[in-house]
């Protein structure tokens, strides 16, 4: 059974930076597509960044130019580097993975494995 665990969340002021990490176990990690989603209170979970096994990335429009998704297959890990954070980025952030995948998409139902989430809070 695959297991994902996030780390790196916290509280920062607007304009600050955070780096989230997601470490995977129980899955052939280098064959996965990976993603980061977030969910703010009272809102739907939304895709923030995706990275396919083909190396293609895509981002939610509101985070383009500020967030960067990357992976290190040797460490079974994918990260989300976030800079110039805004109060509207406040949410619980979840990592996700889909095995035996080439191209990632933003659909939540596409991903089989999820972490439990890490909180990011940005104050103005």
Image (spheres, rainbow, N blue to C red):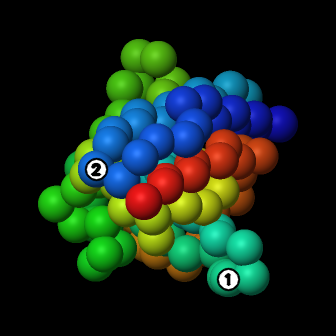
Q: Earlier in the sequence, mark 1 or mark 2?
A: 2
Residue shown at the point (49%, 55%) measured from the top left: 123
**Where is residue 115 drawn, in percent x and y?**
71, 45
Q: Quadrant of the C terminus?
A: bottom left
Q: Quarter-wise, where is residue 23 in the image?
A: top right
Residue shown at the point (31%, 75%) measured from the top left: 62
The residue where tag 2 is placed is 15
Residue shown at the point (22%, 66%) measured from the top left: 64
Q: Residues under labels 1 and 2: Cα distance?
A: 23 Å
**Where is residue 112 drawn, in percent x and y?**
70, 58
User: Relative to the observer, which residue lies in front, 13 or 84?
Assistant: 13
From the viewer's perspective, is residue 69 above or below residue 36? above
Q: Residues within 10 Å of mark 2 (few under 14, many from 20)?
A: some
Instruction: Tell me the mark number nearer the camera, choosing from 1 and 2.
Output: 2
Q: Quadrant of the N terminus?
A: top right
Looking at the image, the residue that sits furthest to the bottom is: 43
Looking at the image, the residue that sits furthest to the left is: 65
State the SS at label 2. loop
The residue where tag 1 is placed is 43
The disc at residue 71 is: none
Q: Residues within 10 Å of mark 1 (few under 14, many from 20)?
A: few
């Amino acid at each position: 059974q695959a297991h994902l665990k996030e780390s790196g969340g916290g509280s920062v002021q607007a304009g600050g930076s955070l780096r989230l990490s997601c470490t995977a176990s129980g899955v052939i990690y280098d064959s996965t597509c990976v993603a980061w989603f977030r969910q703010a209170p009272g809102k739907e979970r939304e895709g923030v960044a995706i990275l396919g096994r083909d190396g293609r990335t895509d981002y939610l429009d509101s985070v383009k130019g500020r967030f960067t998704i990357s992976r290190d297959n040797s460490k079974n890990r994918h990260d989300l580097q976030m800079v110039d954070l805004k109060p509207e980025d406040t949410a619980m952030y979840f990592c996700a993975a889909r095995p035996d995948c080439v191209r990632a998409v933003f659909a939540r139902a596409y991903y089989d494995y999820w972490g439990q989430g890490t909180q990011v809070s940005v104050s103005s």
